[in-house]
Amino acid sequence: MIDRRGIKAAMSKISHRRALLLAAVVPTLLVAGCAASTDSQAMKGEASPASPTGMMSPEETGTGMESGTPTGSPTGTAGAAQARSAVQGFFDAIKSGNVDKVTSSFSDDAVVALAGKATATGGSAIRSLFQEQLKNKDMSKATHTIEDSRDLGPQYAVVRARSKQGGDAYRELFLLADQSGQWKITDLMTNKAS
């Protein structure tokens, strides 16, 4: 017999962890670089809003950009590298138009918020979203650049990327989780770059 209360409690715990992770990570990444131009001036603090009184600048804390890599960042760690590889696999599947591979890049309960589209939650909604996207756009000529990947503990990672599809440029933020040795995208949010 299935213990529905146990399953519900476990799912609630996972959702709660994901919400806390998003609450902690997204504001930091938005300030640190999602608004960065392609020359990374915002990452260097030059185009960022002034920091509130009493807070240290990225240069003072050692979290600024030198040679394109944030100092103190675990970009070179195994989790970050595996998450980066999983996102590259997603981009390769998009370019090839393979909806099955695109969908398999995501966890079963993933959330996808593409710019200008309704949020898709779960495998079937994500499949429908990307079937529509791939049917309406030629993605074979799209370009994708992974800008940063970081560990968020032993089981989670974040990847920032940029894509260009036709005349549209997008910024993308991926949250990934290690699920039994496979990195899966749990959350994807995109917006148009200005």
Image (tube, helix red, strand yellow):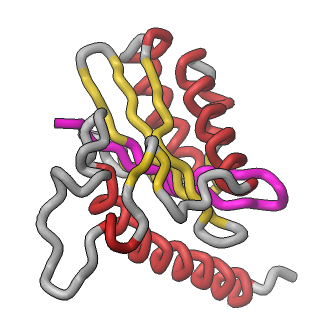
Asked if residue 109 can be seen in this view, the reply is no
Q: Main secondary structure of the magenta part?
A: strand
The magenta span reads 172-194
State whether residue 18 is above or below residue 66.
below
Asked if residue 164 can be seen in this view, the reply is yes
**Which residue occupies the foreground of this view, 123 or 149?**
149
Residue 114, position as x, y percentages in the image: 35, 42
147 left or right, relative to 58? right
Residue located at (39% from left, 75% from top): 23
**Which residue occupies the foreground of this view, 38 or 79?**
38
Residue located at (78% from left, 86% from top): 3
Quarter of the figure with residue 169? top left
Residue 157, position as x, y percentages in the image: 60, 60
Q: Quadrant of the C terminus?
A: top left
Residue 50, position as x, y percentages in the image: 12, 67
**Which residue occupies the foreground of this view, 11 or 139?**
139
In the rendered image, residue 174 lying in the magenta stretch gets the answer yes
Residue located at (53% from left, 56% from top): 158
State whether residue 95 is above or below residue 78.
above
